[in-house]
Image: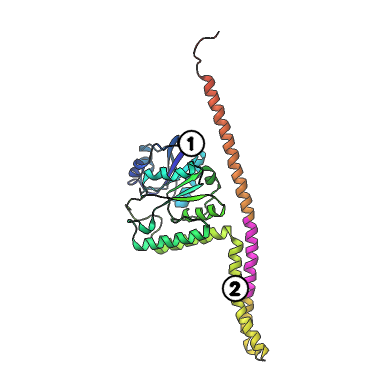
Amino acid sequence: MKLIIQIPCFNEADSLPETLVALPRRIDGIDSIELLVIDDGSSDNTSEVAARFGVHHIVRHRTNRGLAAAFQSGIARALAEGADIIVNTDADNQYEGQDISKLVAPVLAGEADIVVGDRGVRNNAHFGPFKRLLQMFGSAVVKRLSNTQITDAVSGFRAISRSAAQRINITSSFSYTTEMLIQAGRKRMAIVSVPIRTNSAVRPSRLFKSIPQFITNTGATMIRAYAMYNPLKVFMLIGGLAVIVGAAPILRFLYYFAIGEGNGHVQSLVIGGSLVTLGVIAAMFGAIADLVGRNRQLLEQALERLHQVEDTLRSGKDADTSAGQALKQPRNGTDG
């Protein structure tokens, strides 16, 4: 059982050493632990520091592509290196490295596909009142959209089984955390959370420059991810609201028309008819989007099968290599 701990980094040369030192080197039930750093176009010597501290795998982006892209690059590399479990953590040592054993335990026990570290936002001493309120509200929304019971939706401290990692396809350019949960929830994966410890922040977040920017980007990501997996429901809701609003001025016109005063209220009929038309168009878009979504599901299933074939071929190659090495071993004793 191989565990790969991946760490997305952007200009983390100063904080990375402390993070790496805190990571566990042995965990019960895990045969080998390897470290993977994704250098997302850093302008400092993040990659050199990673190599100096013995990181097994280093992926470097030529330019800064964002956290979501770095996470996806790490997942792809970890799968290629044969990871059975992938743990994602931050480079700023926000999460307690020794709690990785708590994260992987449900995956090892076959109880979960994805495990999210719960920072205990409500009572976390490292969070201010406004941040606590914002995190709890955001997690409640994601909980509803993803149909999961996760209470810390934006926690980046996660363990992912190999099969789950092969089924997750991040499309956001901002962050992977909320989209990943919505995808996993809609794909009926087993998702659990475990309490974890956190350290105090050593610097402001580099993911966003302000709270309004974080709210805007996260909100857009959640809406896009939900609409991707529930397009018919989203467009039907929009269309239904347009039809209901449009019906009011139409009924108003019909009332005045019935009492013989319709000539002065034609504008109500025009406005209402336009809104009803937009509602019908939105419903049609929903039907088309739903068909496109079904096609995307078929493509994802094909991609999952491709991953399974690759795993089978890799297992066969490893078995052949092991057999070849066994044949080359010198024999003990003498021939009869």
214 up-or-down from 68: above or below: below
Is 91 left or right of 175, judged from the image as shown?
A: left
Residue at 38% of width from left, 60% of height from top? Answer: 132
3D distance between C-alphas at marks 1 and 2: 54 Å
Residue at 33% of width from left, 60% of height from top? Answer: 128
> What is the three-letter code of the residue carrying label 2?
Ala
Is 28 left or right of 287, judged from the image as shown?
A: left
Please provide the residue range marked out in magenta: 276-293
Percent coordinates x, y for residue 211 in the rendering: 39, 62
Q: Label 1, secondary structure: give it.
A: loop
Of the numbered discs 1 and 2, the one sitting upstream in the chain is: 1
View extreme (bottom): residue? 260
Percent coordinates x, y for residue 118 in the rendering: 41, 52
263 up-or-down from 140: above or below: below
**Residue nearer the viewer, 177 or 110:** 110
View extreme (top): residue? 336
198 up-or-down from 328: above or below: below
Quarter of the figure with the C terminus: top right
Percent coordinates x, y for residue 191 in the rendering: 50, 50
Residue corresponding to mark 2: 242
Magenta-span inclusion, residue 255:
no
- Is residue 89 at all visible to an observer of this figure? yes
Residue corresponding to mark 1: 1
- Is residue 210 at all visible to an observer of this figure? no
Residue at 34% of width from left, 62% of height from top? Answer: 129
> What is the three-letter code of the residue carrying label 1?
Met
